[in-house]
Image: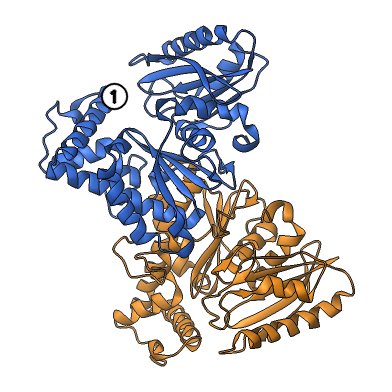
Chain colours: A orange, B blue
């Protein structure tokens, strides 16, 4: 028995087969058709899914999907921010038509990441954890009491919209001072530019989506390299991100009585340049006795996490599927 | 069948009988013996409990307790901040000895309040809510997916320690800028004094506990009266509290995807003087689409909430007891 796992992102599509032990037995990836309309995106994904499903040889018991928000959940009508071609696209219904007779389940890609880290990654053994992704955005998923927390509309886990600077920078959500507005890769790179840092590439703010996101993340990667090389502005940017993340995690730990936080995504690869100031700010603010036990670990699963977490919506529904 | 419900506070002890419909059929209250040592506090509570239990006429099926934190949970070894006579006091074990053969369950008093509001109060019908108390402290309890969230150590719901001003006032927890450090009654009154407000009573900071708390809350009540009468500093203090609560609720709503927040406790009685700035700040910051649905309501149950919530730990254990 295997699950068809689907990970839909703004820059790549991935489909794999995951067995009942949570092992990814095979996977295929392709670039997301840039600028694709709804139909082009669907054809690319459906083709990839069929090519992989053929190799399941009749063993397919369900489909699990991770995709960027927002979406109507659990129905799975999706409008991923970074895929303008899909607005109110009925992804679950389409896959159900294509693969009839088996359950098709969906969640936010950051939730799938958190589920994977809880099931088979750095969060294994913790019953109360936040899995977090810091990249072009800042997202996450909450597991409390050993179960995935959905919230009222499937949107629990939005750690990126905890407020860390009440009068801070405007956020894409319309608010102000959200963690995401401070610590997502493009925001950090933009902040560094205002401090005099030179990214050495195109002026990213002039580019259209999704090139903007690509270039902005390239800038953020450059920023991390420069920080590692000792550039003082780049180092300050990493401290700025780490401190903001630490503050948000102190709030989340107090509210949810967490044991553990795992952090993945591109920016987490800056390592101690981010984790050190993160720890410092977390420990300064997470001062209730119960909160001092919380641990922060790098994610363990790498790029397969999205597929493994999506599969868990089928394979470990007792823990991860209340929808 | 009835449950013996126990609500232990720094200024009063309350014990009641709650029937299976959640009706408080009788209750008795007495002042907490001021300055009492462990034994004096226990004798007072045990006497009250026995006097009430006698009237249960053999129908007693369990005991539920709400008490201020911190405590070792679910063991129920308690060290309430506002009851210095109890440090590591084995409250559950003592009540189990006194009333053998029935379950004895305990939770934080703010959690009991939230449970009551979910079961029979303003939160009835919501599956994803925060119940919050704003008084000498700021506490709360989380119900997500229709179930009480305990967190790893029974401490989930500590909304008072979400950070709302990263460089703000020192908090009793050792941190800085927590909601509680800004919005609890005594902190508000102290802030108003620094702005030139005259409380018209003793200089509360010179008084010993628990007189300090009594006097500080009297000052906070005076502050609310003065605000209602139009005193500009008192009004500014209410706005300060409302804004801070709104910020914390925006963070909590984004993280937990809440439908509803209920607010009780002394300060919530300031009504729109607090709720208006609260709404303004919440709506400015809770901008994700899913978060805009959250509603904030005054608590519905009044002073019986603590007893009803404590009883629910026994009577509705499928929703409120995982311990």
Say how many tags the image has: 1
Q: Position of residue B263 (x, y in %)?
A: 39, 40
In this image, A301 relative to A100: left or right?
left
The image quadrant where one finds the N terminus of chain A is bottom right
Secondary structure found at label 1: loop
Q: Residue at x 61, y 13 (%)?
A: B97
Which residue is at the front of the view, A234 or B211?
A: B211
Q: Is residue B170 visible?
A: no
Looking at the picture, tell me which residue is in the foreground, B279 or A107. Answer: B279
User: Tag 1: Cα neighbours inside 10 Å, few (<14), some, or many (≥20)?
Assistant: some
Report in which chain the residue with disc 1 lies. B
- The answer to whether residue B30 is above or below residue B149 is above
Q: Is residue A46 left or right of residue B91?
A: right
Q: Is residue B71 visible?
A: yes
Q: Can you identify the residue that label 1 sits on?
A: B209
Farthest residue to the right: give it: A57
Judged left or right of residue B119, residue A231 is: left
Picture coordinates of residue A213 (x, y %)? 48, 83
Q: Tell me the quarter of the image containing the C terminus of chain A.
A: bottom right
Give coordinates of residue B119: x percent, y percent: 54, 35
Residue plotted at (43% across, 90% down): A207
Residue B214 x, y percent position in the rendering? 27, 25
Q: Identify the residue shown where x is 64% and y is 62%.
A: A74
């Amino acid at each position: 028995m295997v699950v068809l796992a689907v990970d839909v992102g703004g820059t790549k599509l991935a489909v794999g087969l995951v067995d009942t032990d949570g092992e990814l037995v095979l996977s295929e990836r392709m670039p997301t058709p840039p600028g694709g309309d709804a139909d082009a995106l669907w054809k690319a994904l459906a083709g990839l899914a069929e090519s992989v499903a053929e190799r399941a040889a009749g063993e397919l018991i369900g489909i699990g999907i991770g995709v960027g928000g927002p979406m109507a959940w659990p129905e799975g009508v999706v409008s991923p921010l970074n895929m303008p071609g899909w607005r109110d696209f009925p992804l679950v219904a389409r896959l159900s038509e294509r693969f009839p007779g088996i359950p098709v389940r969906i969640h936010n890609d950051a939730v799938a990441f958190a589920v994977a880290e809880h099931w088979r990654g750095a969060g294994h053994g913790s019953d109360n954890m936040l899995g977090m992704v810091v990249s072009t955005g800042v997202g996450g998923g909450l597991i409390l009491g050993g179960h995935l927390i959905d919230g009222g509309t499937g949107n629990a886990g939005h750690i990126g919209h905890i407020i860390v600077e009440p009068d801070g920078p405007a956020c894409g959500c319309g608010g102000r001072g959200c963690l995401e507005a401070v610590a997502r890769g493009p925001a950090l790179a933009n902040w560094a530019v205002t401090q005099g840092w030179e990214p050495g590439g195109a002026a990213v703010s002039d580019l259209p989506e999704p090139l903007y996101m690509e270039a902005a993340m390239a800038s953020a990667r450059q920023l991390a390299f420069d920080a590692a090389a000792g550039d003082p502005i780049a180092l300050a940017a990493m401290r700025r991100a780490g401190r903001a993340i630490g503050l948000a995690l102190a709030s989340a730990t107090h509210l949810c009585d967490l044991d553990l936080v795992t952090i993945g995504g591109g920016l987490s690869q800056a390592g101690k340049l981010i984790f050190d100031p993160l720890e410092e700010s977390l420990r300064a603010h997470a001062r209730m006795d119960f909160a001092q036990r919380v641990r922060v670990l790098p994610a363990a699963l790498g790029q397969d996490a999205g597929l493994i977490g999506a599969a868990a919506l089928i394979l470990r529904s007792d823990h991860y599927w209340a929808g």
